[in-house]
Amino acid sequence: MATVSGIHHVTAICDTAGQNIAFYADLLGLRLVKRTVNFDAPDSYHLYYGDETGRPGTLVTFFAWPDALQGRLGTGQAESIAFAVPPGSIEHWADRVGRRGINAEEVERFDERLLRFHGPDALRLELVEAEVDTEPWAGGSVDPEHAIRGLYGVTLAVEGYERTADLLGTMGYDPVGEERDRFRYTVTGDAGSILDVRCRPDLRRGRIGVGSVHHVAFRTADGASQREWRETLAERGLDVTPVLDRKYFESIYFREPGGVLFEIATDGPGFTVDEPEASLGEELQLPEWLEPRRAEIERDLPMIFYR
Ligand code: ZN
């Protein structure tokens, strides 16, 4: 039986692109690997951050919706995004975010130390001390000794966890522990292999908006394995989209039984298909089918006020 190999990327909604870049690139030290538009709504930015080349498992991405309402945290959503940092680096990070006036709290969970705080737009973020065998982006703003190594995982908030857990089993996740209302699952992968499901019947249904996670994408090797996933999920009665060309990967989307929007994305072709590795993220990139509309799209996009 096939398994997904961890999280490919997590996509959230932010207010302005400038504030987003200042936080994720400058403060967290991630590389802005792609500056493009939302392919389904090209009047808004889609920004991708990751390691040097934006490998799957290191990616967090944002739709910039400056005119949207603030989202409401609730069930049927991912409630937080966790990044992996090297053991012993929490103090460095507490100091780093503290100097930006961000209140961070150190907590322990499943015998691991983590720092939690809010990013821009009140998005919940965590830095978890974990042994991850990957290199950080050497060109980042953070000392490589402490720098983010990629995604650690996400926490989903659902009303009841059983049906979500059952689907995770199909996707290759194994249960590895529980702590209060939190059920932990892992899958084999080199980054982003943790999925926590929190059972939150006390919460209302979440409302998507600024500061919300839009969807969680999982990795599959290629188009052939993705088509197999599509069949497997459809056989379970889930409504799965056709394969969509996201230029840097191909995607299918479906809502898991707890209401969270999931995606399964191919590992390739990656972010160097339209610009060289050395200058990733510097210029606005458009897919071929939007290139004829470049002048209009550039005119309608908001200016990025950054520094
Ligand atoms: Zn996605």
Image (tube, helix red, strand yellow):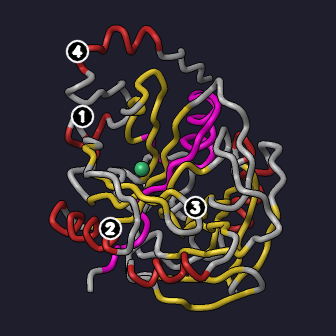
Numbered range of the magenta stretch: 3-32
- The quarter holding residue 20 reads top right
Taking depth in this image into account, of 85 and 251 the one nearest to the observer is 251
Which residue is found at the position 54% from the left and 89% from the top? 175
Q: State the image coordinates of residue 273 (x, y, percent, origin top left).
A: 20, 41
Q: Which residue is mark 4?
A: 292
Q: Nearer the viewer, residue 144 or 240?
A: 240
Label 3 sits on residue: 259
User: Magenta includes 9?
Assistant: yes
Q: Secondary structure at mark 2?
A: helix
Q: Are marks 4 and 3 in contact (CB under 8 Å)?
A: no
Tags 2 and 1 touching, CB below 8 Å = no
- Which residue extends farthest front? 237
Look at the picture and state if 156 lies above or below 125. Answer: below
Mark 4 Cβ and ligand 1 under 8 Å apart:
no
Q: Residue at x 43, y 66 (%)?
A: 7
Classify residue 257 as left or right of residue 179: left
Query: How far across and how far down the image is residue 102, in percent?
Result: 80, 48
Ligand 1 within 8 angstroms of badge 3 C-beta? no
For discs 2 and 3, the disc positioned in front in the rendered view: 2
Residue under numbered circle 2: 234
The Cα atoms of the two marked residues, 3 and 1, are separated by 36 Å
